[in-house]
Amino acid sequence: MADDTATAILGDSSYFKDPPSTEDLSNYVNELISTCDGTLQQWRLGTESHKCDQYINCLDGLIHETLLVAEKRCRLACDGISNSRVCKYIILKLFETGDLDKTCKYITILCKKRNQSKRCIIEIVTMSMNWIYGDDVQLDNKYKLIEVLCNVTAGKMFLEAEWAKLLMKQSQMKELEGDIKAATEILQDVPIETFGSVSKKYKGEYILEQMRLLLLNEDYIRFYSCSQKINEKLLCGDEFKDMKFLYYKYMIQYYVHDNDYFKVSKCYCKILDTPDIPEQFILDNTSHYLLFLIVSNHSSERTELLKSAKTDCKGVSKIPILVNLLDQFLSQNLITLPFNDEMNKYIQEHQLFQNTPFPKGDERLKLLQLRAVQHNIQIIQQNYTNITIDRLVQLSRSTAEDILPQIFEMVNLGLITAKIDRLNNTIDFNPSKDPQKLLNDWSERVQKVLVMIDDVCRLIEKDKMLQDAKEKRIKLELMLDS
């Protein structure tokens, strides 16, 4: 909606429109171009080449004596159509001679003319860009042409889309040469999201290309800043489905590098929320979602997602071995380590625990075992108030060297409360009482006692008043009877 409004405003702005023409010079330009074509054709037939010195000298003469005069007349008459025809004719004929330096020179001269029509500049740039995308121009010459066109388009709002495309092409050329750093530097600072004349879809594709290059260049700080330019709500539309997959693919790579596996799992969850996706695609992403969720750090949100995974997650019922693993982490029983052969084979062969496509697969495998040990320790805490370290090692399926660091980490995370007695080699799981909490509890209990005392005093006073009233009534009745 915002883009549509911006486009409407830009379309009505005089900055994007040429003033009305004062004279129609189309017939004059038609005759002029026809005459120039005839003259150049004679020289071409005589020399059998449009790149010889005589032909070039003839063209230079026509440009200076005839075509530039016609260009000025069209420009002063504000006839943008005729002016663009003359300018394009000059540049095209120069390009055909193979003299790219002179072609670039005249592109700059014609586009920088005072009061040059916007239509003329746009058509010159558009025609020149076609040569960049073609195969007729050598690579070095393409760089020269891009540099000239970037100088022409830079700072002009009506050419912001062309400027962005030129930088994109230059970046792609650098990438093909293997210079990823240069390709990234060219594209990373282009504020494509601020361009009102560019569609939402092209903006998204452009930002995704920026994200891809920043990932290749391992510039993760700029990558995250760039990723915030995309509104994830806009990716829910059917037209943005491919962009949505690509966006979350890049975000997954970023979060894997950052070791934030919970956010990785949420990215997979967003992918699975997409309608009309193939079944095999669902199964692959479901397994990644659940395994990343299991190895992620403990949190209340993680626990809720694990509990709802069996009912809310697509395709989980078709992966029974994954359901079994999920049940073990949700149960109140100890997880047997090492896993059985079938489970161990599935885990070892899964992409998540290999070094491709995600690095540090071995670390995630150790992390999965650590999460199983932490689950066991939490279950033990619920059933023991005091236990020896040797017995804890045996029940948790850990080792004597690893158990204490794991206890320390879980206590710091607030997952358990424990007090270690190194002399007796025991661990006390009784929750430690916070002095502030103890004081608050005592204050609450005292307040309750005072409220109860107040209620009792009120009831006693009430009963006393009733008794006094009863005695007065009896005395009054006796006096009346006497």
Image (spheres, helix red, strand yellow):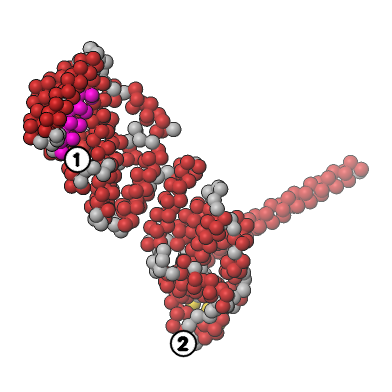
**Residue at the location (82% across, 48% down)?**
470
Q: Is residue 452 above or below residue 160?
A: below
Magenta stretch in the rendered image: 84-98
Is the Cβ of the residue at disc 1 closer than 8 Å to that at disc 2? Answer: no
Q: Is residue 181 left or right of residue 316?
A: left
Identity, as a three-letter code, of the amino acid under mark 1? Leu
Q: Main secondary structure of the magenta part?
A: helix
Residue farthest right in this picture: 481
- For the residue labelled by badge 1, is the local secondary structure a helix, a strand or a loop? helix
| Image quadrant assignment for residue 21 | top left
- Which residue is under mark 1? 145
Q: Nearer the viewer, residue 120 or 462?
A: 120
Residue 392 in view: no
Q: Quadrant of residue 394?
A: bottom right
According to the picture, the residue beneath numbered tag 2 turns out to be 423
Residue 172 at x, y percent in the picture: 28, 49
Query: Residues under labels 1 and 2: Cα distance?
Result: 79 Å
Report how many numbered discs are placed on residues in the image: 2
Task: Name the residue rendered at 44%, 69% in the picture.
Answer: 354
Quarter of the image with the N terminus is top left
| Residue found farthest to the bottom | 424
Percent x, y of residue 135: 26, 44
| Mark 1 nearby-residue class (10 Å; few <14, some 14–19, many ≥20) | many
The quadrant of the rendering that contains the C terminus is top right
Please give left or right for residue 99 compared with residue 327 in the image.
Answer: left
Of circles 1 and 2, which is in front?
1
Amino acid tagged 2: Leu
